[in-house]
């Protein structure tokens, strides 16, 4: 799967603006950012946990 191009991103932003309105977009952006941050922290925590288990088993 490839990344969206500039016209595609503009179309997505316009659709979001029409659907949610200008007042809701900043709030949705904040919520999306928090969600992605939590997901990233959880994923890195799981990776660190697995690496710790591998180190214990290799000793």
Image (spheres, rainbow, N blue to C red):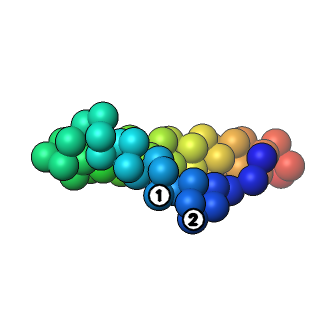
Please name the residue shown 39% across and 42% down the image. Answer: 15
Report x, y in % for residue 50.
69, 42
Between 5 and 40, the residue placed more toward the observer is 5
- Residue at x 18%, y 49% (from the top left corner): 22
Front-most of residues 3 and 50 = 3
Using the image, tell me which numbered label, if any, was put on residue 6: 2
Q: Nearer the viewer, residue 40 or 49?
A: 40
Residue of label 1: 10
- Residue 31 visible in the shown view: no
Q: Where is residue 49? Give x, y as percent.
A: 62, 43
User: Looking at the picture, does residue 20 appear above or below residue 40?
Assistant: above
Horizontal arrangement in the rendering, residue 43 relative to residue 37 (left or right)? right
Residue under the image location 71 percent in, 49 percent down? 51
Q: Residue furthest right?
A: 58
The residue that appears at 83% across and 51% down in the rendered structure is 59
Q: Is residue 9 left or right of residue 55?
A: left
């Amino acid at each position: 799967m490839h990344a969206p191009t500039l016209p595609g991103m503009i179309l997505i932003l316009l659709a979001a603006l029409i659907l949610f309105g200008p007042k809701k977009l900043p709030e949705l952006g904040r919520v999306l950012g928090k969600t992605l941050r939590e997901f990233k922290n959880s994923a890195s925590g799981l990776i660190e946990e697995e690496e710790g288990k591998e180190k214990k088993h290799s000793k």
